[in-house]
Image (cartoon, rainbow, N blue to C red):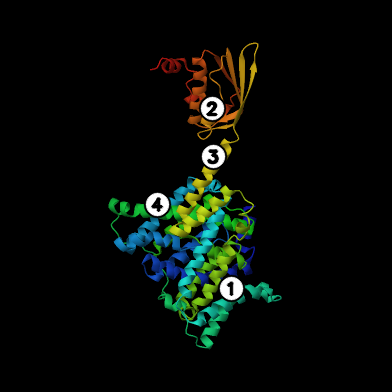
Amino acid sequence: MLLYSTRKDWFGNVRGDLLAGLVVALALIPEAIAFSIIAGVDPRVGLYASFAIAVITAIVGGRPGMISAATGAMALLMVTLVKEHGLQYLLVATLLTGVIQIVAGYLKLGNLMSFVSRSVVTGFVNALAILIFMAQLPELTNVTWHVYAMTAAGLGIIYLFPYLPVVGRTIPSPLVCILSLTAIAVIYGIDVRTVGDMGELPATLPVFLLPDVPWTLDTLMIVLPYSVSLAVVGLLESLMTATIVDDLTDTPSDKNRECKGQGIANIGAGLLGGMAGCAMIGQSVINVKSGGRGRLSTLCAGVFLLIMVVFLGPWLSMIPMAALVAVMIMVSIGTFSWSSIINIKHHPKSTTLVMLVTVVVVVATHNLAYGVLAGVLLASLFFANKVSHFMYVASELDAQTQTRHYTVVGQVFFNSADRFASNFNFKEVLNKVVIDLSRAHFWDISAVAALDKVVIKFRREGADVQVIGLNEASATIVDRFGVHDKPEEIEKVLGGH
Protein backbone atom coordinates (compact mmCIF):
# COMPACT_ATOMS: atom_id res chain seq x y z
CA MET A 1 0.00 0.00 0.00
CA LEU A 2 2.83 2.38 0.96
CA LEU A 3 4.72 1.50 -2.24
CA TYR A 4 1.61 2.18 -4.35
CA SER A 5 1.02 5.50 -2.61
CA THR A 6 4.67 6.55 -3.11
CA ARG A 7 4.62 5.60 -6.81
CA LYS A 8 1.36 7.49 -7.31
CA ASP A 9 2.73 10.60 -5.54
CA TRP A 10 5.91 10.64 -7.63
CA PHE A 11 5.15 8.95 -10.95
CA GLY A 12 1.37 9.01 -11.29
CA ASN A 13 1.38 12.09 -13.54
CA VAL A 14 4.92 12.48 -14.94
CA ARG A 15 4.24 14.62 -18.05
CA GLY A 16 1.78 16.92 -16.28
CA ASP A 17 4.09 17.33 -13.30
CA LEU A 18 7.15 18.12 -15.46
CA LEU A 19 5.34 20.80 -17.50
CA ALA A 20 3.62 22.29 -14.46
CA GLY A 21 6.97 22.39 -12.62
CA LEU A 22 8.48 24.37 -15.50
CA VAL A 23 5.65 26.92 -15.46
CA VAL A 24 5.87 27.32 -11.70
CA ALA A 25 9.66 27.75 -11.82
CA LEU A 26 9.26 30.62 -14.32
CA ALA A 27 6.62 32.25 -12.10
CA LEU A 28 8.74 31.76 -8.96
CA ILE A 29 11.80 33.64 -10.20
CA PRO A 30 10.50 37.25 -10.25
CA GLU A 31 8.55 36.68 -7.04
CA ALA A 32 11.59 35.30 -5.21
CA ILE A 33 13.63 38.32 -6.37
CA ALA A 34 10.84 40.74 -5.37
CA PHE A 35 10.49 39.14 -1.92
CA SER A 36 14.26 39.36 -1.41
CA ILE A 37 14.09 43.08 -2.17
CA ILE A 38 11.17 43.49 0.30
CA ALA A 39 13.22 41.76 3.03
CA GLY A 40 16.27 43.91 2.19
CA VAL A 41 18.58 41.10 1.10
CA ASP A 42 20.38 40.04 -2.09
CA PRO A 43 18.12 38.36 -4.74
CA ARG A 44 20.09 35.12 -4.44
CA VAL A 45 18.83 34.73 -0.82
CA GLY A 46 15.24 34.41 -2.06
CA LEU A 47 16.16 32.30 -5.08
CA TYR A 48 18.27 29.82 -3.07
CA ALA A 49 15.48 29.63 -0.46
CA SER A 50 12.85 28.89 -3.12
CA PHE A 51 15.02 26.11 -4.57
CA ALA A 52 15.76 24.50 -1.19
CA ILE A 53 12.23 24.76 0.21
CA ALA A 54 10.54 23.45 -2.95
CA VAL A 55 12.89 20.46 -3.25
CA ILE A 56 12.77 19.52 0.44
CA THR A 57 8.98 19.86 0.84
CA ALA A 58 8.53 17.74 -2.30
CA ILE A 59 10.23 14.90 -0.41
CA VAL A 60 9.11 15.38 3.22
CA GLY A 61 5.97 17.56 2.96
CA GLY A 62 2.47 16.30 3.65
CA ARG A 63 0.65 17.76 0.62
CA PRO A 64 1.71 16.47 -2.83
CA GLY A 65 1.50 19.11 -5.57
CA MET A 66 1.70 22.10 -3.21
CA ILE A 67 4.42 24.67 -3.94
CA SER A 68 6.47 26.11 -1.09
CA ALA A 69 9.14 28.80 -1.49
CA ALA A 70 10.14 32.29 -0.33
CA THR A 71 6.95 34.35 0.18
CA GLY A 72 5.92 37.97 0.62
CA ALA A 73 4.09 37.29 3.92
CA MET A 74 7.32 35.94 5.43
CA ALA A 75 9.52 38.63 3.82
CA LEU A 76 7.52 41.40 5.49
CA LEU A 77 8.31 39.93 8.92
CA MET A 78 12.06 39.95 8.25
CA VAL A 79 12.52 43.62 7.35
CA THR A 80 13.35 44.93 10.85
CA LEU A 81 15.68 42.02 11.70
CA VAL A 82 17.69 42.46 8.49
CA LYS A 83 17.85 46.24 8.91
CA GLU A 84 19.03 46.08 12.54
CA HIS A 85 21.20 42.96 12.59
CA GLY A 86 21.96 41.86 9.01
CA LEU A 87 21.71 38.74 6.86
CA GLN A 88 23.56 36.35 9.20
CA TYR A 89 20.99 36.85 11.96
CA LEU A 90 18.22 36.27 9.41
CA LEU A 91 19.78 32.88 8.60
CA VAL A 92 19.81 31.99 12.34
CA ALA A 93 16.13 33.08 12.57
CA THR A 94 15.37 30.84 9.58
CA LEU A 95 16.98 27.82 11.29
CA LEU A 96 15.08 28.48 14.53
CA THR A 97 11.82 28.92 12.58
CA GLY A 98 12.36 25.43 11.16
CA VAL A 99 12.95 23.94 14.62
CA ILE A 100 9.76 25.55 16.00
CA GLN A 101 7.73 24.23 13.05
CA ILE A 102 9.07 20.69 13.51
CA VAL A 103 8.11 20.82 17.20
CA ALA A 104 4.63 22.07 16.16
CA GLY A 105 4.34 19.04 13.86
CA TYR A 106 5.20 16.60 16.68
CA LEU A 107 2.73 18.39 18.96
CA LYS A 108 0.12 17.76 16.21
CA LEU A 109 -0.79 21.45 15.96
CA GLY A 110 -1.83 20.76 12.36
CA ASN A 111 -5.03 19.34 13.86
CA LEU A 112 -5.96 22.90 14.92
CA MET A 113 -7.00 23.47 11.28
CA SER A 114 -10.27 21.77 12.21
CA PHE A 115 -11.12 24.94 14.18
CA VAL A 116 -10.85 27.10 11.05
CA SER A 117 -14.33 27.40 9.58
CA ARG A 118 -15.14 27.33 5.87
CA SER A 119 -16.03 31.04 5.93
CA VAL A 120 -12.53 31.87 7.29
CA VAL A 121 -10.91 29.76 4.54
CA THR A 122 -13.05 31.55 1.93
CA GLY A 123 -12.06 34.94 3.37
CA PHE A 124 -8.40 33.90 3.39
CA VAL A 125 -8.60 32.81 -0.25
CA ASN A 126 -10.33 36.01 -1.36
CA ALA A 127 -7.86 38.18 0.54
CA LEU A 128 -4.91 36.39 -1.04
CA ALA A 129 -6.45 36.80 -4.49
CA ILE A 130 -6.78 40.55 -3.86
CA LEU A 131 -3.19 40.77 -2.54
CA ILE A 132 -1.85 38.84 -5.55
CA PHE A 133 -3.65 41.25 -7.90
CA MET A 134 -2.48 44.32 -5.95
CA ALA A 135 1.12 43.04 -6.13
CA GLN A 136 0.91 43.28 -9.95
CA LEU A 137 -0.21 46.93 -9.97
CA PRO A 138 3.33 48.41 -9.73
CA GLU A 139 4.10 46.63 -13.02
CA LEU A 140 1.02 48.23 -14.61
CA THR A 141 1.46 51.85 -13.47
CA ASN A 142 3.49 54.54 -15.24
CA VAL A 143 4.31 52.20 -18.14
CA THR A 144 3.99 52.37 -21.93
CA TRP A 145 1.03 51.00 -23.85
CA HIS A 146 3.17 48.01 -24.88
CA VAL A 147 2.92 46.61 -21.35
CA TYR A 148 -0.90 46.77 -21.36
CA ALA A 149 -1.01 45.22 -24.83
CA MET A 150 1.30 42.37 -23.84
CA THR A 151 -0.58 41.73 -20.58
CA ALA A 152 -3.91 41.62 -22.45
CA ALA A 153 -2.38 39.33 -25.10
CA GLY A 154 -0.99 37.10 -22.33
CA LEU A 155 -4.42 36.78 -20.71
CA GLY A 156 -5.92 36.01 -24.12
CA ILE A 157 -3.40 33.20 -24.66
CA ILE A 158 -3.94 31.80 -21.14
CA TYR A 159 -7.72 31.60 -21.46
CA LEU A 160 -8.12 30.80 -25.18
CA PHE A 161 -5.22 28.40 -25.84
CA PRO A 162 -6.83 25.48 -23.91
CA TYR A 163 -9.71 25.53 -26.45
CA LEU A 164 -7.36 24.46 -29.27
CA PRO A 165 -7.84 20.78 -30.18
CA VAL A 166 -5.21 18.31 -28.83
CA VAL A 167 -2.34 20.79 -28.24
CA GLY A 168 -4.49 23.01 -26.02
CA ARG A 169 -4.79 20.26 -23.44
CA THR A 170 -1.22 19.00 -23.81
CA ILE A 171 0.79 22.16 -23.10
CA PRO A 172 -0.03 24.43 -20.13
CA SER A 173 -1.32 27.77 -21.43
CA PRO A 174 0.71 29.84 -18.89
CA LEU A 175 3.90 28.33 -20.36
CA VAL A 176 2.74 29.19 -23.89
CA CYS A 177 2.01 32.73 -22.68
CA ILE A 178 5.51 33.21 -21.23
CA LEU A 179 7.33 31.73 -24.26
CA SER A 180 5.18 33.58 -26.83
CA LEU A 181 5.47 37.03 -25.24
CA THR A 182 9.21 36.59 -24.67
CA ALA A 183 9.68 35.71 -28.34
CA ILE A 184 7.60 38.72 -29.47
CA ALA A 185 9.52 41.10 -27.17
CA VAL A 186 12.92 39.81 -28.39
CA ILE A 187 12.07 39.63 -32.13
CA TYR A 188 10.50 43.09 -32.28
CA GLY A 189 12.82 44.67 -29.73
CA ILE A 190 9.96 45.97 -27.58
CA ASP A 191 11.27 48.05 -24.70
CA VAL A 192 9.44 46.66 -21.65
CA ARG A 193 10.55 45.76 -18.13
CA THR A 194 12.03 42.25 -17.94
CA VAL A 195 13.01 39.73 -15.26
CA GLY A 196 16.62 40.94 -15.65
CA ASP A 197 15.54 44.40 -14.47
CA MET A 198 14.34 42.96 -11.16
CA GLY A 199 17.86 42.23 -9.92
CA GLU A 200 21.04 40.33 -10.70
CA LEU A 201 20.57 36.59 -10.99
CA PRO A 202 23.11 34.35 -9.17
CA ALA A 203 25.74 32.64 -11.34
CA THR A 204 26.77 29.94 -8.82
CA LEU A 205 25.14 27.02 -7.06
CA PRO A 206 24.30 27.48 -3.35
CA VAL A 207 26.81 26.12 -0.83
CA PHE A 208 26.31 24.66 2.64
CA LEU A 209 27.22 27.15 5.38
CA LEU A 210 26.58 27.94 9.03
CA PRO A 211 25.58 31.52 9.89
CA ASP A 212 28.57 33.61 10.98
CA VAL A 213 27.23 34.81 14.35
CA PRO A 214 28.17 34.32 18.00
CA TRP A 215 26.20 31.26 19.12
CA THR A 216 25.11 32.73 22.45
CA LEU A 217 21.92 33.25 24.44
CA ASP A 218 21.93 36.92 23.36
CA THR A 219 21.76 35.88 19.71
CA LEU A 220 18.89 33.49 20.51
CA MET A 221 16.94 36.24 22.31
CA ILE A 222 17.42 38.60 19.32
CA VAL A 223 16.04 36.15 16.74
CA LEU A 224 13.44 34.32 18.88
CA PRO A 225 10.57 36.86 18.50
CA TYR A 226 11.08 36.94 14.73
CA SER A 227 11.32 33.14 14.51
CA VAL A 228 8.08 32.64 16.44
CA SER A 229 6.26 35.10 14.13
CA LEU A 230 7.75 33.47 11.03
CA ALA A 231 6.84 29.98 12.27
CA VAL A 232 3.21 30.94 13.05
CA VAL A 233 2.60 32.82 9.78
CA GLY A 234 4.43 30.14 7.77
CA LEU A 235 2.37 27.31 9.24
CA LEU A 236 -0.90 29.21 8.92
CA GLU A 237 -0.32 30.00 5.25
CA SER A 238 0.95 26.48 4.53
CA LEU A 239 -1.94 24.70 6.27
CA MET A 240 -4.54 27.01 4.71
CA THR A 241 -2.98 26.49 1.28
CA ALA A 242 -2.92 22.72 1.85
CA THR A 243 -6.66 22.85 2.64
CA ILE A 244 -7.29 24.76 -0.60
CA VAL A 245 -5.20 22.33 -2.69
CA ASP A 246 -7.08 19.45 -0.99
CA ASP A 247 -10.30 21.00 -2.35
CA LEU A 248 -8.86 21.67 -5.82
CA THR A 249 -7.56 18.11 -6.23
CA ASP A 250 -10.23 16.36 -4.13
CA THR A 251 -7.50 14.51 -2.19
CA PRO A 252 -6.58 14.54 1.53
CA SER A 253 -3.23 15.60 3.05
CA ASP A 254 -1.35 15.07 6.30
CA LYS A 255 -1.30 18.48 8.03
CA ASN A 256 1.06 17.44 10.86
CA ARG A 257 3.53 15.97 8.36
CA GLU A 258 3.28 19.28 6.48
CA CYS A 259 4.27 21.17 9.66
CA LYS A 260 7.38 18.99 10.03
CA GLY A 261 8.14 19.21 6.30
CA GLN A 262 7.98 23.02 6.34
CA GLY A 263 10.32 23.03 9.35
CA ILE A 264 12.89 20.72 7.72
CA ALA A 265 12.70 22.82 4.52
CA ASN A 266 13.37 26.06 6.40
CA ILE A 267 16.38 24.52 8.16
CA GLY A 268 17.67 23.42 4.74
CA ALA A 269 17.09 26.91 3.33
CA GLY A 270 18.96 28.54 6.24
CA LEU A 271 21.96 26.22 5.78
CA LEU A 272 22.11 27.09 2.05
CA GLY A 273 22.01 30.85 2.64
CA GLY A 274 18.28 31.27 2.03
CA MET A 275 15.46 33.03 3.90
CA ALA A 276 12.49 31.36 5.59
CA GLY A 277 9.52 30.51 3.38
CA CYS A 278 6.22 28.64 3.33
CA ALA A 279 3.52 27.41 0.94
CA MET A 280 2.45 29.79 -1.84
CA ILE A 281 -1.19 29.74 -2.78
CA GLY A 282 -0.57 31.54 -6.10
CA GLN A 283 2.08 29.11 -7.33
CA SER A 284 0.16 26.14 -5.93
CA VAL A 285 -2.88 27.19 -7.98
CA ILE A 286 -0.66 27.67 -11.08
CA ASN A 287 0.72 24.16 -10.49
CA VAL A 288 -2.71 22.55 -10.18
CA LYS A 289 -4.19 24.53 -13.11
CA SER A 290 -1.17 23.56 -15.25
CA GLY A 291 -1.71 19.86 -14.57
CA GLY A 292 0.63 19.33 -11.59
CA ARG A 293 -0.65 16.85 -9.02
CA GLY A 294 2.27 14.92 -7.50
CA ARG A 295 5.47 15.52 -5.58
CA LEU A 296 7.40 15.47 -8.86
CA SER A 297 5.91 18.83 -9.88
CA THR A 298 7.17 20.51 -6.67
CA LEU A 299 10.60 18.90 -7.03
CA CYS A 300 10.83 19.96 -10.69
CA ALA A 301 9.80 23.51 -9.84
CA GLY A 302 12.76 23.80 -7.44
CA VAL A 303 15.27 22.05 -9.70
CA PHE A 304 14.20 23.94 -12.86
CA LEU A 305 14.36 27.20 -10.91
CA LEU A 306 18.00 26.61 -9.93
CA ILE A 307 19.03 25.38 -13.39
CA MET A 308 17.43 28.37 -15.08
CA VAL A 309 18.82 31.10 -12.80
CA VAL A 310 22.34 29.63 -12.74
CA PHE A 311 22.78 28.27 -16.27
CA LEU A 312 20.14 30.08 -18.35
CA GLY A 313 20.34 33.48 -16.66
CA PRO A 314 20.84 35.55 -19.87
CA TRP A 315 17.80 33.91 -21.54
CA LEU A 316 15.72 34.15 -18.41
CA SER A 317 16.48 37.85 -18.08
CA MET A 318 14.67 38.46 -21.38
CA ILE A 319 11.24 37.33 -20.11
CA PRO A 320 8.99 40.42 -20.04
CA MET A 321 7.38 41.07 -16.67
CA ALA A 322 4.08 41.61 -18.55
CA ALA A 323 3.98 37.87 -19.31
CA LEU A 324 4.37 36.97 -15.64
CA VAL A 325 1.86 39.66 -14.64
CA ALA A 326 -0.67 38.00 -16.97
CA VAL A 327 -0.01 34.63 -15.31
CA MET A 328 -0.43 36.11 -11.81
CA ILE A 329 -3.67 37.90 -12.80
CA MET A 330 -4.93 34.52 -14.01
CA VAL A 331 -3.97 33.10 -10.59
CA SER A 332 -5.78 35.96 -8.85
CA ILE A 333 -8.96 35.40 -10.88
CA GLY A 334 -8.76 31.63 -10.39
CA THR A 335 -8.06 31.90 -6.66
CA PHE A 336 -10.91 34.28 -5.80
CA SER A 337 -14.07 32.47 -4.69
CA TRP A 338 -16.61 34.16 -6.98
CA SER A 339 -19.39 31.99 -5.59
CA SER A 340 -18.88 33.68 -2.20
CA ILE A 341 -20.25 36.93 -3.68
CA ILE A 342 -23.38 35.15 -4.96
CA ASN A 343 -23.75 33.33 -1.62
CA ILE A 344 -23.88 36.59 0.34
CA LYS A 345 -27.64 36.64 -0.36
CA HIS A 346 -28.20 33.06 0.73
CA HIS A 347 -25.72 32.40 3.55
CA PRO A 348 -26.34 33.48 7.17
CA LYS A 349 -25.22 37.03 7.94
CA SER A 350 -22.75 35.74 10.54
CA THR A 351 -21.00 33.56 7.92
CA THR A 352 -20.75 36.47 5.49
CA LEU A 353 -19.43 38.79 8.22
CA VAL A 354 -16.69 36.32 9.21
CA MET A 355 -15.61 36.04 5.58
CA LEU A 356 -15.59 39.84 5.05
CA VAL A 357 -13.70 40.55 8.31
CA THR A 358 -11.03 37.99 7.35
CA VAL A 359 -10.64 39.66 3.93
CA VAL A 360 -10.50 43.21 5.32
CA VAL A 361 -7.97 42.40 8.08
CA VAL A 362 -5.64 40.45 5.75
CA VAL A 363 -5.74 43.12 3.02
CA ALA A 364 -5.35 45.98 5.52
CA THR A 365 -2.44 44.46 7.47
CA HIS A 366 -0.90 42.26 4.75
CA ASN A 367 -0.58 39.74 7.59
CA LEU A 368 -2.38 36.44 7.04
CA ALA A 369 -2.09 35.46 10.71
CA TYR A 370 -4.05 38.53 11.88
CA GLY A 371 -6.82 37.91 9.36
CA VAL A 372 -7.20 34.22 10.18
CA LEU A 373 -7.09 34.94 13.93
CA ALA A 374 -9.79 37.64 13.60
CA GLY A 375 -11.95 35.29 11.51
CA VAL A 376 -11.56 32.33 13.87
CA LEU A 377 -12.35 34.46 16.95
CA LEU A 378 -15.44 35.98 15.32
CA ALA A 379 -16.64 32.57 14.06
CA SER A 380 -16.16 31.14 17.58
CA LEU A 381 -18.22 33.95 19.13
CA PHE A 382 -21.03 33.46 16.62
CA PHE A 383 -20.96 29.69 17.21
CA ALA A 384 -21.07 30.08 21.00
CA ASN A 385 -23.98 32.50 20.71
CA LYS A 386 -25.85 30.19 18.35
CA VAL A 387 -25.36 27.08 20.50
CA SER A 388 -26.43 28.91 23.67
CA HIS A 389 -29.86 29.57 22.12
CA PHE A 390 -30.51 25.83 21.80
CA MET A 391 -30.69 25.48 25.61
CA TYR A 392 -34.07 25.56 27.36
CA VAL A 393 -35.64 24.45 30.65
CA ALA A 394 -39.10 22.85 30.90
CA SER A 395 -40.91 22.32 34.21
CA GLU A 396 -43.87 20.41 35.64
CA LEU A 397 -45.53 20.69 39.08
CA ASP A 398 -46.88 17.79 41.12
CA ALA A 399 -49.41 19.75 43.22
CA GLN A 400 -50.14 16.81 45.51
CA THR A 401 -46.58 16.53 46.79
CA GLN A 402 -45.57 20.13 46.01
CA THR A 403 -42.71 18.83 43.83
CA ARG A 404 -41.46 20.82 40.84
CA HIS A 405 -39.72 18.74 38.15
CA TYR A 406 -37.33 20.73 35.94
CA THR A 407 -35.98 19.20 32.69
CA VAL A 408 -32.90 20.92 31.18
CA VAL A 409 -32.23 20.40 27.46
CA GLY A 410 -29.12 21.59 25.60
CA GLN A 411 -25.61 22.85 26.22
CA VAL A 412 -24.77 24.75 29.41
CA PHE A 413 -21.52 26.76 29.24
CA PHE A 414 -20.25 30.30 29.86
CA ASN A 415 -22.57 31.88 27.32
CA SER A 416 -25.75 30.06 28.38
CA ALA A 417 -25.11 29.73 32.15
CA ASP A 418 -27.05 32.88 33.09
CA ARG A 419 -30.00 31.88 30.88
CA PHE A 420 -29.96 28.45 32.57
CA ALA A 421 -30.18 29.98 36.06
CA SER A 422 -32.88 32.48 35.06
CA ASN A 423 -35.32 29.65 34.16
CA PHE A 424 -35.87 28.63 37.81
CA ASN A 425 -38.51 30.20 40.07
CA PHE A 426 -36.98 30.49 43.54
CA LYS A 427 -40.00 32.28 45.06
CA GLU A 428 -42.33 29.32 44.56
CA VAL A 429 -43.13 27.47 47.79
CA LEU A 430 -42.05 23.84 47.22
CA ASN A 431 -41.27 20.76 49.27
CA LYS A 432 -39.00 19.21 46.70
CA VAL A 433 -37.24 20.20 43.44
CA VAL A 434 -35.98 17.61 40.94
CA ILE A 435 -33.54 18.88 38.28
CA ASP A 436 -33.28 16.37 35.44
CA LEU A 437 -30.02 16.88 33.43
CA SER A 438 -30.19 13.70 31.34
CA ARG A 439 -30.66 15.77 28.14
CA ALA A 440 -28.14 18.47 29.03
CA HIS A 441 -24.35 18.76 28.99
CA PHE A 442 -22.21 20.88 31.32
CA TRP A 443 -19.03 22.14 29.64
CA ASP A 444 -17.14 24.46 31.99
CA ILE A 445 -16.88 25.92 35.49
CA SER A 446 -19.31 28.72 34.57
CA ALA A 447 -21.97 26.06 34.01
CA VAL A 448 -21.06 24.29 37.27
CA ALA A 449 -21.24 27.60 39.18
CA ALA A 450 -24.72 28.22 37.73
CA LEU A 451 -25.89 24.78 38.89
CA ASP A 452 -24.46 25.43 42.36
CA LYS A 453 -26.26 28.77 42.49
CA VAL A 454 -29.61 27.18 41.56
CA VAL A 455 -29.33 24.29 44.06
CA ILE A 456 -28.16 26.48 46.95
CA LYS A 457 -30.89 29.08 46.34
CA PHE A 458 -33.61 26.42 46.42
CA ARG A 459 -32.17 24.95 49.63
CA ARG A 460 -32.13 28.43 51.19
CA GLU A 461 -35.87 28.59 50.45
CA GLY A 462 -36.35 25.31 52.33
CA ALA A 463 -36.80 22.93 49.37
CA ASP A 464 -35.21 19.49 49.12
CA VAL A 465 -33.20 19.47 45.85
CA GLN A 466 -32.33 16.36 43.83
CA VAL A 467 -30.06 16.54 40.75
CA ILE A 468 -30.44 13.52 38.45
CA GLY A 469 -29.34 12.32 35.02
CA LEU A 470 -25.84 13.86 34.75
CA ASN A 471 -23.90 12.16 31.96
CA GLU A 472 -20.38 10.88 32.74
CA ALA A 473 -18.47 13.87 31.32
CA SER A 474 -20.73 16.41 33.04
CA ALA A 475 -20.63 14.48 36.31
CA THR A 476 -16.82 14.58 36.25
CA ILE A 477 -16.63 18.36 36.00
CA VAL A 478 -19.48 18.88 38.49
CA ASP A 479 -17.87 16.53 41.05
CA ARG A 480 -14.55 18.29 40.66
CA PHE A 481 -15.64 21.94 40.77
CA GLY A 482 -19.17 21.92 42.18
CA VAL A 483 -19.96 22.73 45.84
CA HIS A 484 -23.70 22.05 46.14
CA ASP A 485 -23.15 18.39 47.11
CA LYS A 486 -20.25 19.07 49.50
CA PRO A 487 -21.63 19.74 53.04
CA GLU A 488 -18.54 21.60 54.26
CA GLU A 489 -18.64 23.98 51.29
CA ILE A 490 -22.40 24.45 51.57
CA GLU A 491 -21.94 25.33 55.27
CA LYS A 492 -19.50 28.08 54.27
CA VAL A 493 -21.89 29.49 51.68
CA LEU A 494 -25.05 29.30 53.79
CA GLY A 495 -23.21 30.49 56.88
CA GLY A 496 -22.01 33.58 55.07
CA HIS A 497 -18.31 32.79 55.54
Closer to the eye: label 4 or 2: 2
Residue 247 is situated, as x and y percent measured from the top left of the image, at 62, 56
Residue 107 is situated, as x and y percent measured from the top left of the image, at 48, 45
Kindly identify the amino acid type of the residue bearing the numbered disc 1. Answer: Pro
In the picture, the disc for residue 228 is: 4
Residue 254 visible within the image: no
Residue for badge 3: 384
Kindly identify the amino acid type of the residue bearing the numbered disc 2. Answer: Ser
In the picture, the disc for residue 422 is: 2
Q: Mark 1 and mark 2 in contact (Cβ < 8 Å)?
A: no
Element under label 2?
A: helix
Report the front residue among 188 and 59: 188
Estimate the spatial distance between the alpha carbons at disc 4 and disc 1, rounded to whole Å: 36 Å
Q: Residues within 10 Å of mark 1 (few under 14, many from 20)?
A: many
Left or right? Give the position of 113 relative to 401.
Answer: left
| N-terminal-most mark, 3 or 1 | 1
Residue lying farthest to the front in this orientation: 427
Closer to the eye: label 2 or 1: 2
Kindly identify the amino acid type of the residue bearing the numbered disc 4. Answer: Val
Closer to the eye: label 3 or 2: 2
Estimate the spatial distance between the alpha carbons at disc 3 and disc 2, rounded to whole Å: 19 Å
Estimate the spatial distance between the alpha carbons at disc 4 and disc 3, rounded to whole Å: 30 Å
Q: Residue at x 62, y 63 (%)?
A: 11
Kindly identify the amino acid type of the residue bearing the numbered disc 3. Answer: Ala
| N-terminal-most mark, 4 or 3 | 4
| N-terminal-most mark, 2 or 1 | 1
| N-terminal-most mark, 3 or 2 | 3
